[in-house]
Image (tube, coloured by chain):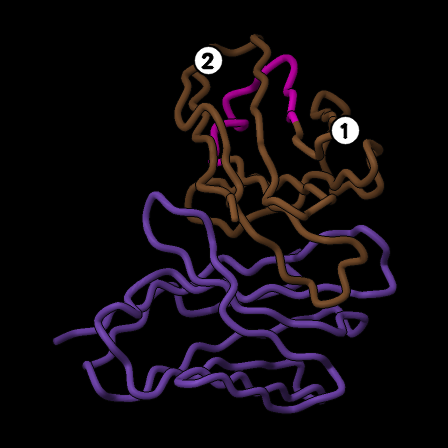
Chain colours: A purple, B brown
Amino acid sequence: DQQVKQNSPSLSVQEGRISILNCDYTNSMFDYFLWYKKYPAEGPTFLISISSIKDKNEDGRFTVFLNKSAKHLSLHIVPSQPGDSAVYFCAARYSGGGADGLTFGKGTHLIIQP
Amino acid sequence: ETGVTQSPTHLIKTRGQQVTLRCSSQSGHNTVSWYQQALGQGPQFIFQYYREEENGRGNFPPRFSGLQFPNYSSELNVNALELDDSALYLCASSSAPLLAGELFFGEGSRLTVL
């Protein structure tokens, strides 16, 4: 059973517009959420994170929103740029779980159209 | 600052064989974790090593084993390879304690089992 779900395998957005990537989770013990970005033939790179005590975290063009009651988070990219074309993974962890690692979603392939 | 490096980048094995994958952690990081990413899936946590001991493990059978060395580099060993072991194996390093959850990934070792 997938505990972190990214229901959109792909998303196409025009350059300059807003990209919104969604992620749902089922495990209410998760208290820290991260987004990773992956280019082909490269490892995932950390993008932005949010603690469950917050509902928003912003870093430049990237903003992550967390809705705990809905067990939903989203990543907003504004404005979208061609270099943003990549696979985006949502990940979660439970900080009290010791070394349990991150639980990842299947990823969303974001394509920025010129 | 040296990033996470993995070797080999690609390898092909046959069913029943054994494989060893290697990882050098980013300088200053003392914790290494391994993830398996099957085609079309997100990375899945295999295990984590801290101070040369396994201190966390995902849902993987015992034929997946590892080592961490005094210089914090690590190996992943898989015995009795099965076709389903074909995947990208990602190594990630971090500093303990993993407060922020941010991992630094290598480019991965792509294993094909025939």
Q: Which residues are magenta?
A: B75-88
Residue B95: image tag:
none
Q: Position of residue B14 (x, y in %)?
A: 47, 10
Is mark 1 in CB contact (under 8 Å) with mark 2? no
Against B59, residue A38 (above or below) is: below
Mark found first going from the N terminus, 1 or 2: 2
Q: Chain of mark 2?
A: B
Task: Using residue B84 as the reference point, say whether residue A31 is left or right of it.
Answer: right
Front one among B67 and B15: B67
Magenta segment includes A94: no
Q: How many numbered circles are shown?
A: 2
Quadrant hosting residue B21 = top right
Front one among A51 and B24: B24
- The residue under the point 34% across, 54% down is A39
Quadrant hosting residue A67 = bottom right
Give the residue type that dot 1 points to. Answer: Pro
- Where disc 1 sits, the SS reads loop
Q: Chain of mark 1?
A: B
- The residue under the point 33% across, 62% down is A86
Against B47, residue A28 (above or below) is: below
Q: Position of residue B9 (x, y in %)?
A: 41, 28
Estimate how packed mark 1 is, as few (under 14), some (14 to 19) or many (20 or more) residues with alpha carbons within 10 Å. Answer: few
Residue B13: image tag:
2
Residue B70: image tag:
1
Q: Position of residue B97 (x, y in %)?
A: 81, 57
Give the residue type that dot 2 points to. Answer: Lys
- Where disc 2 sits, the SS reads strand
Q: Position of residue B48 (x, y in %)?
A: 74, 41
- The residue under the point 66% across, 45% down is B45
